[in-house]
Image (tube, grey):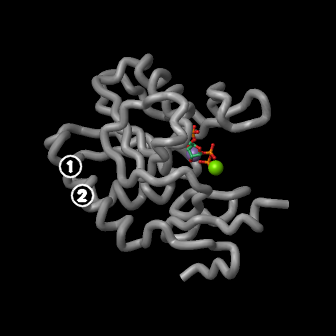
């Protein structure tokens, strides 16, 4: 297991909790799509873990594709202005699309992505996210599948980074303030 030393404050969600919830989410998704072909769209880089763990739990006709987006604007990530760094390879016309995310914080990234993908003529577009911070929402995003609602704290692991680190942790933890308070 990854050793976080003093960087970790506490474990918020264990690997077992994440996997048990993914079992439930996958069963719900399988039931909802009832064998219809489904395109999973993962948002790089944070969604890598949840995409891999969710996709392998799904039955039926599943494809996976990826987008990389970058928020920019006034220096902070939550400007709501989004630039596509890597677009999909897949034509969405008539497709059932499920966006897969690690976390919804302000909601600005997904709000933009949702309208972007909807403009490409898909049959449906829904969202699955492992984590959501309800109290941090700046815009309401209609999310079909949520793993866990969590408090507005700085969390890392299971795809989530601080300065690109800690994504590989198999659990979700809070970061000790000394790590990000310089
Ligand atoms: C993080 C996270 C979500 C987004 C959520 O990605 O993975 O994609 O921020 O924030 P929002 O709801 O406030 O828009 P980030 O931009 O850090 O890129 P990364 O996935 O490569 O870490
Ligand atoms: Mn991300
Ligand atoms: Mg990040």
In the rendered structure, the answer to whether residue 162 lies left or right of residue 30 reads right
Picture coordinates of residue 162, whole percent (x, y): 68, 58
161 w.r.t. 128: above or below: below
Q: Which mark is residue 47?
A: none
Dividing the picture into quadrants, the one containing residue 23 is bottom left
**Cα distance in 3D space between marks 2 and 1:** 6 Å
* Secondary structure under the numbered disc 1 in the rendered image: helix
Q: Residue at x 62, y 72 (%)?
A: 9
Picture coordinates of residue 74, whole percent (x, y): 78, 29
Dividing the picture into quadrants, the one containing residue 10 is bottom right
Picture coordinates of residue 59, whole percent (x, y): 21, 54
Q: Name the residue that disc number 1 marks.
A: 28
58 w.r.t. 124: above or below: below
Q: Nearer the viewer, residue 87 or 6?
A: 6
Count residues near mark 1 (Cα–Cα under 10 Å), then give few for <14, some for 14-19, many for 20+.
Answer: some
In the rendered structure, the answer to whether residue 18 lies left or right of residue 42 reads left
Count residues near mark 2 (Cα–Cα under 10 Å), then give few for <14, some for 14-19, many for 20+.
Answer: few
**Is the Cβ of the residue at disc 2 closer than 8 Å to that at disc 1?**
yes
Q: Residue at x 24, y 58 (%)?
A: 24
Q: Quadrant of the N terminus?
A: bottom right
172 w.r.t. 127: above or below: below
Q: Nearer the viewer, residue 88 or 6?
A: 6
Q: Nearer the viewer, residue 164 or 92?
A: 164
Q: Name the residue that disc number 2 marks.
A: 24
Q: Residue at x 49, y 22 (%)?
A: 116
Q: Residue at x 59, y 61 (%)?
A: 156
Q: Quadrant of the C terminus?
A: bottom right
């Amino acid at each position: 297991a990854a050793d976080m030393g003093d960087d970790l404050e506490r474990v918020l969600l264990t690997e077992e909790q994440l996997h048990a919830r993914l079992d439930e989410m996958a069963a719900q998704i399988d039931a909802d799509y009832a064998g219809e072909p489904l395109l999973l769209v993962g948002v790089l880089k944070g969604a890598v873990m949840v995409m891999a763990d969710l996709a392998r739990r799904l039955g039926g006709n599943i494809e996976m594709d990826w987008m990389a987006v970058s928020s920019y604007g006034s220096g902070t990530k939550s400007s709501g202005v989004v630039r596509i760094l890597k677009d999909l390879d897949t034509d969405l016309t008539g497709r059932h699309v499920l966006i897969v995310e690690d976390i919804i914080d302000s909601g600005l990234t997904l709000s933009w992505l949702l309208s972007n993908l909807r403009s490409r003529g898909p049959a449906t577009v829904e969202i699955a996210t492992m984590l959501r911070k309800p109290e941090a929402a700046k815009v309401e995003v209609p999310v079909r599948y949520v793993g866990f609602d969590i408090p507005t704290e700085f969390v890392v692991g299971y795809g989530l980074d601080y300065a690109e680190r800690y994504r590989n942790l198999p659990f979700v933890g809070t970061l000790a303030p000394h790590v990000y308070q310089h």
